[in-house]
Amino acid sequence: MVRFENVTFEYIRRDEEGNVDSITTALDELSLHIKKGEFIAVLGSNGSGKSTFARHINALLKPTEGKVVVAGYDTTDDDNILEIRQRAGMVFQNPDNQIVAETVEEDVAFGPENMGIPTDEMQKRVDEALKKVGLYKKKLESPNRLSGGQKQRVAIAGILAMKPDCIIFDEPTAMLDPGGRRMIVETAHELNKKDGITIILITHNMEETVGADRIIVMEKGRIALEGTPRQVFSKGEETLKKYGMEVPVITALAQKIGLDGCILTREEFVDAYVKALE
């Protein structure tokens, strides 16, 4: 689905005369393959390159060196941009930045309309997308009257209406309350499991990553750690802290009371606790 081949990206700062003032390397010879249908969680401290990585998948940024290929399309070719953005949609941190219309229905229709989708097909896509995110009954309401979590689901519906193969979530829960965060992560997993959509979740929240197929930990534009959630969170507290990470709360609690293994979910915790009591 996504292929990074020795990708380097540099932010170049220039002075008032146009001369190069400084160069910051955000991605440093990054190579990575993501399969269709995978759920990938990307972690890392501020400045590790997570958001720069995400914006390359949607062709919002192009490599200084190397190549990014999305669904077989090279992002450096301007003729591929529309096709790439239809196949790889992006949900940003602030849902208000993605609201463009007066009603939920019109907002979700914005993408398909710009793609030139016929009216009947567009309405069908909008209704299907809103049903998937649980907002069909609110389609005639103003998105500005919705909660933060509901606004994010409107943004997700807008992407779904374009029939993507992949959705990139760039810290979508950062501005939400716990209920809103849980709602968005559950929606992402449902789209992955039921519809086979490739999910790439950029996050700071360890709890949001435990259901991923693979975790990628970034540091200074490179991959520092990679593996299943259990493999990554088994690395030990000192290793994780080095990359600005902690183990999930449930994992830390299990470790403190002496339960065996790397426990990631409440269900695993309960099972291990009952066995320990027995």
Image (cartoon, grey):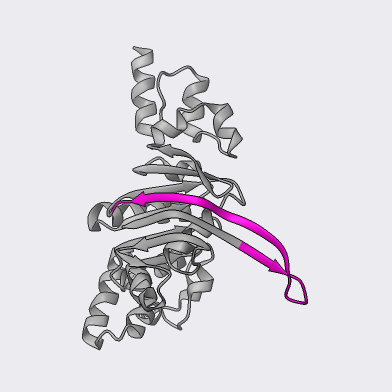
Left or right, residue 242 beside residue 262: right
SS assignment for the magenta stretch, majority: strand
State which quadrant residue 194 falls in. Answer: bottom left
Q: Nearer the viewer, residue 267 or 11?
A: 11
Residue 23 shown in magenta? yes
Q: Residue furthest top?
A: 278
Q: Residue at x 36, y 74 (%)?
A: 80
Q: Is any atom of residue 94 visible in this view? A: yes
Whether residue 144 is in magenta: the answer is no
The residue stretch that appears in magenta = 11-35
In the image, what residue occupies the spot 39% across and 20% down?
Answer: 273
Residue 211 horizontal side relative to residue 49, left or right = left
Quadrant of the snapshot with the C terminus: top left
Q: Is residue 176 visible from the viewing direction of this image?
A: no
Q: Position of residue 137 (x, y in %)?
A: 32, 72
| Residue 187 horizontal/vertical position (percent) | 35, 56
Kindly identify the residue that appears in the image at 36 percent across and 21 percent down. 272
Compared to residue 259, the image places residue 192 above or below, namely below
Q: Which quadrant is home to the N terminus?
A: bottom left
**Could you say which is closer to the camera, residue 171 or residue 124?**
171
Position of 235 with respect to 84 (left or right) is: right
Tally of numbered tags: 0
> For this view, does 123 lie left or right of residue 159?
left
